[in-house]
């Protein structure tokens, strides 16, 4: 594997997502967020996986456009 894999601490993931640690744990338990890699007592997430999850989570919001105004018939 030639690419560098950056591992994120739990504190980094919750900072990126803007959530608390309990919310992250709830998302993982409900299979709404990827499970961490367990290294001893530590948990880590691959940065690119977190970024993919975030991009998918905000995709609908990013593609939002205001409704077009309908013209009145004269």
Image: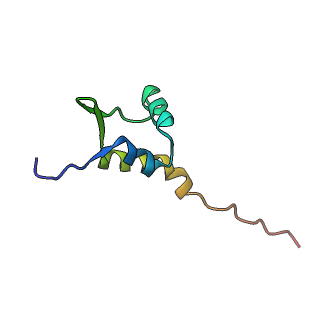
Q: How is the image coloured?
A: rainbow
Name the residue nearer the viewer: 34 or 36.
Answer: 36
Residue 61 is left or right of residue 13, and the answer is right
Up/down of 31 relative to 63, above or below: above
Between 40 and 69, the residue placed more toward the observer is 40
Q: Quick one: which residue is furthest to the bottom in this view?
A: 74
Q: Residue at x 49, y 52 (%)?
A: 59
Q: How many marks?
A: 0
**Could you tell me which quadrant the C terminus lies in?**
bottom right
Residue at (77, 65) in percent of width and height: 70
State the residue lying farthest toward the right: 74
What residue do we see at 37% from left, 41% from top?
10
How far across and how far down the image is residue 23, in percent?
A: 51, 35
Left or right: residue 47 versus residue 28 is left
Q: Residue furthest front?
A: 41
Measured along the vertical axis of the image, is residue 61 above or below residue 23?
Answer: below
Q: Percent x, y for residue 42?
A: 28, 34
Q: Can you name the residue that lies furthest to the top here?
A: 29
* Residue 30 percent coordinates (x, y): 47, 26
Residue drawn at x 54%, y 51% as measured from the top left: 60
């Amino acid at each position: 594997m030639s690419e560098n894999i950056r591992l994120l601490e739990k504190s980094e993931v919750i900072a990126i997502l803007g959530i608390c640690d309990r919310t992250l744990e709830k998302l993982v338990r409900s299979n709404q967020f990827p499970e961490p890699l367990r290294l001893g007592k530590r948990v880590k997430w691959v940065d690119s996986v977190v970024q993919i999850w975030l991009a998918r989570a905000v995709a609908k919001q990013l593609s939002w456009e205001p409704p077009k105004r309908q013209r009145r018939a004269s």
